Amino acid sequence: MRNLRRTKLKNLHAEAEQFRRRAVVGFLVIALAMLGLAAGYFRLQVLQHEEYQLRSEANRIKPRPIVPARGLIYDRNGRLLADNVPAYRLEIVAEQVGDLEATLAGLAGLVEIDEEDLARFRETRRATRSFRPVPLKLRLSEGELARLAVNRHRFPGVEVVPYLTRRYPYGDLFAHVIGYVGRVDVADLEAMGDSRNAALTHIGKAGIERYYEDRLRGEIGYEEVETNVEGRALGVLRRHDAKPGNDLTLTVDARLQQAMVDAFEGQHGAAIAIDPANGEILGMVSLPSYDPNLFINGIGHKDWQALQAPARPLFNRNVLGGVPPGSTIKPFMALAALEAGIRTPEYETLSTGEFFLPGQSRGYRDWRPGGHGRVNLRESLAQSVNSYYFELAVEMGVDRLDEYFDRLGFGHPTGIDLAGEIPGVRPSRAWKRRQLNQNWFPGDTVNAAIGQGYWVTTPLQLVQATGLLANGGVRHRPHLLKATQAGFNAPLVPEPQPPGVLLVKDPAHLAAVNEGMVAAMHGPTGSGRSAALGSTYQMAGKTGTVQRVSRRGTERMDPNQLPYHLRHQAWFIGFAPAEAPTVAVVVLVEHGGSGARAAAPIGRRILDAWLLPPPEDTPR
């Protein structure tokens, strides 16, 4: 009885009320959760449907780039200068190879694999998934292809993959014009900017290949490839074809180019031939040269070391090199004086063999002991009389000379379509103060009058100015691109060029200068007459010799008796036929000793190659 009184009776009504309250709260929580879940599904399925659909597709479909064929390069007559040819590379898929080291050792017995190939393979493999192919050797010879075909069954996971590669059929003949392509590096990718270009394996590194890279490259296409979660390709869904690069037709002539190289007979130097009527470069050589095919898939250490010779075969003397112009500056000095009105063609100067500035005891000498006697403008050019130009320069003054040579283009890049052209040096008061922090002296003017002293002139600047003499005083920009073609069946589109600039006020002044240059080649006193003997056409020209060492006192020196590396630089400028020029040339022979003996004969052979009927044209 006592225990029953102590037992508390349950309040069923209160418990039921509590359960209802908890049920309502639980229902509300579940309802809110369901609403939140529904809102999330609505956001994902409706509001952000397109975004997540694209993400899903991106995880399933990968774009695989298609690299376009690079544009071809031709000479003015349709000869192929840069081609795309089939080649074969050796690739390895690591996951399909049982023993990778044994496979590499076995392959080394069939193909030539150097340490650079192995190092590149191992580095690339570390950054590549095991099911993706990794190149081991980028170029296989026909013999290597045959040996691999016979032993193919021994090497699972090893594939021979065909592709197109660049080829330069003329080898070293056009190396400094066309340049070469090389493998893309990080700096190239940063310079190109567009991420799609990351698929490119090669890019223009020098010459025309570099300057017109955007045109030659084309536009990259792609395939939409379905992949699994590991990234393995399952199939191609769609294909967007690449757009091949444009074909380029250059202004150069392969036959003339070969003739220019042959004319040097192994000597080092540079030469350019242009059409003075429009600035088209007909031929341009820098010697010695190199084989651009060595660079396409990465040059080996041995080949690279061979190109570091003192003769600098990689150095483009026409674009990057410059030396004083010597006496080739005299026709332009004469033209400047005529245009300024301080000389007439008939004005005579007495050449006694030595010229003195007022109040100075040091003499500036003519090349002929005892001088040339009384000479006018014609004979000053024919005999290359220094004292005529010493007197002229002092009277005209460096400031007026600087202004005129600035108009002619000296001291400025010509604007040729090749990268890296230097401006050279046009000596003046401002230049000397800026570069040397020194005053200009009268002796500097005397030296500048005959193309010595501080002058630095490139062959391109001289050939542009020579073309002006041959073309009625009109200066054209030297250029290499003649036309572009966007596909095999597309029309050939001429490359637009800026109009020429008329720089000579009086045609009679130009005629007087050209008469002197004709006399230099054909006159009885002409300094270059030996090079013109037997010519069936009339040429105008001027030789130049640039001293590399100074004489002591009144001592005279024979440049041919000097050590080779100290011999004078030899120049020749000219054009022909003199009465209606179709070609202008500039020749620079390094250590040639004498312009008349070394450079002028080469210039004659170049003019002959262009103007005379060619021998039977056999492809190289």
Image (tube, rainbow, N blue to C red):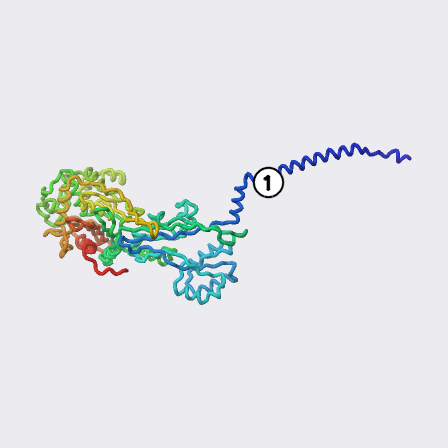
Residue 17: name its quadrant: top right
Residue 45 placement, left or right of 149:
right
Q: Position of residue 174 (x, y in %)?
A: 29, 54
Residue 144: name its quadrant: bottom left
Give the quadrant of the N terminus: top right
Which residue of the protein is positioned furthest toward the left in this rendering?
A: 374
Question: In front here: 126 or 177?
Answer: 177
Q: Position of residue 18 (x, y in %)?
A: 75, 33
**Quick check: can you spot residue 401?**
yes
- Number of other residues with Cα within 10 Å of mark 1, as a class: few under 14, some 14 to 19, many 20 or more: few
Tag count = 1
Q: Amino acid at mark 1?
A: Tyr
Which residue of the protein is positioned furthest toward the right in this rendering?
A: 1
Residue at x 46% of width, y 66% of height: 151
Mark 1, residue position: 41
Q: Position of residue 615 (x, y in %)?
A: 21, 60
Residue at x 17% of width, y 51% of height: 576
Give the quadrant of the C terminus: bottom left
Residue 233 placement, left or right of 301:
right
Question: In front here: 132 or 389?
Answer: 132
Secondary structure under tag 1 reads helix
**Quick check: can you spot residue 312?**
no
Question: In front here: 51 or 595?
Answer: 51
Q: Position of residue 417 (x, y in %)?
A: 30, 47
